[in-house]
Amino acid sequence: MTTDATEPEEEEFDSWIAHNTTYIEETKQLLAEYVEHQSFEKLKEQVQEENILNKQTSKYRRDVLREVARLYIPSKVEFIETPLMRAVTSDVDDAVKDWLIYYEFSQNHLLYTLTTELLYPEYTAGTMYVEASDIQGFIRQLEDDHPEISEWSQSTVEEASTKYLSALKNFGLLKGVQRKEFAVFYVPDEVIAYVFYQIAGDQQPTVEEIVEHPDWQLFLFDTNEVRRRLEGISPRYIRYERRGSTERIEPEFDNIWEVIDEFQY
């Protein structure tokens, strides 16, 4: 008997994110419209012909729809509701919706890597400022493991770096103009619950697997902060107990859909 020991190929980085802006308000509006009509074609018609975004040029309307669809709508053929769509169309506060959009936005492989492998370590090391040149240098360092980066022009790398920092400023993690400074921000409890259930999925992960998951680093949380925030959402969203060196964590709901529905009450 032979064993296939082939390692799965790592996902390639996508430079197209360099052409993307965050479109936070537009994302909420378009996803709500998509859920209402349950049709991408109807959504397209509403954007292009009815101008529900109230944008002057048809090109801008197309650009916004294309970017929102690329990031948050999994199929243009059939209606597929995602947890983000369920949350965006709920009665939860806009601040919660904005942070959930940030979380899903950051699942892009390049963005995820930049935040968890560069920004988070810089934050925990006490660095005060981050500049586009820091991002550019880090992207170039990734070329050894990601040869696709070598095909990017310098202008592509520069634009990706600038857009990345601008996006995190728009979402509230950074502030400043040329040099970006880490901002003081608060992530709502509902977002902590959403991330927990996304990490857990349909598995029964250990406390360590939850606490040490890199998704929390997207919010610049270290493991102590994760534990503190998990305690804060217990027992409403999860059951979390910590006594000395003993920890126990269990979901309060069967899945993420149920917990999102709870946000509305």
Image (spheres, rainbow, N blue to C red):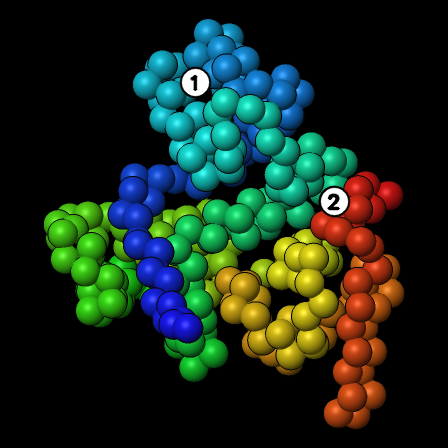
Position of 71 with respect to 186 (left or right) is: left
The answer to which image quadrant residue 186 occupies is: bottom right
Residue 54 showing in the rendered view: no
Of pointers 2 and 1, the one earlier in the residue sequence: 1
The answer to which image quadrant residue 33 occupies is: top right
Three-letter amino acid code of the residue under disc 2 = Trp
Badge number at residue 257: 2
Can you name the residue that lies furthest to the top here?
A: 49
Can you name the residue that lies furthest to the bottom here?
A: 244
Which tag is nearer the camera, tag 2 or tag 1?
Answer: 2
Position of 191 with respect to 111 (left or right) is: right
Name above or below for residue 125 compared with residue 258: below
Where in the figure is residue 124, as x and y percent of width and height? 47, 78
Density class for disc 2 (Cα within 10 Å; few <14, some 14-19, many ≥20) is: some
In the image shown, does 24 or 78 lie closer to the viewer?
A: 78
In the image shown, does 4 or 66 lie closer to the viewer?
A: 4
For the point 87% across and 65% down, which residue is it?
235
Q: Secondary structure at mark 1?
A: loop
Name above or below for residue 3 compared with residue 200: below
Where in the figure is residue 214, as x and y percent of width and height? 52, 69
For the point 14% across and 52% down, which residue is it?
151
Three-letter amino acid code of the residue under disc 1 = Lys
Can you name the residue that lies furthest to the front here?
A: 1
Residue under label 1, please give it. Answer: 55
Residue 78 showing in the rendered view: yes
Instruction: Quarter of the image for the N terminus: give it.
Output: bottom left
Where in the figure is residue 4, as x and y percent of width and height? 38, 68
Where in the figure is residue 184, as x and y percent of width and height? 56, 64
Q: CA distance from mark 2 to mark 1?
A: 33 Å
Density class for disc 1 (Cα within 10 Å; few <14, some 14-19, many ≥20) is: few
Position of 128 with respect to 91 (left or right) is: left
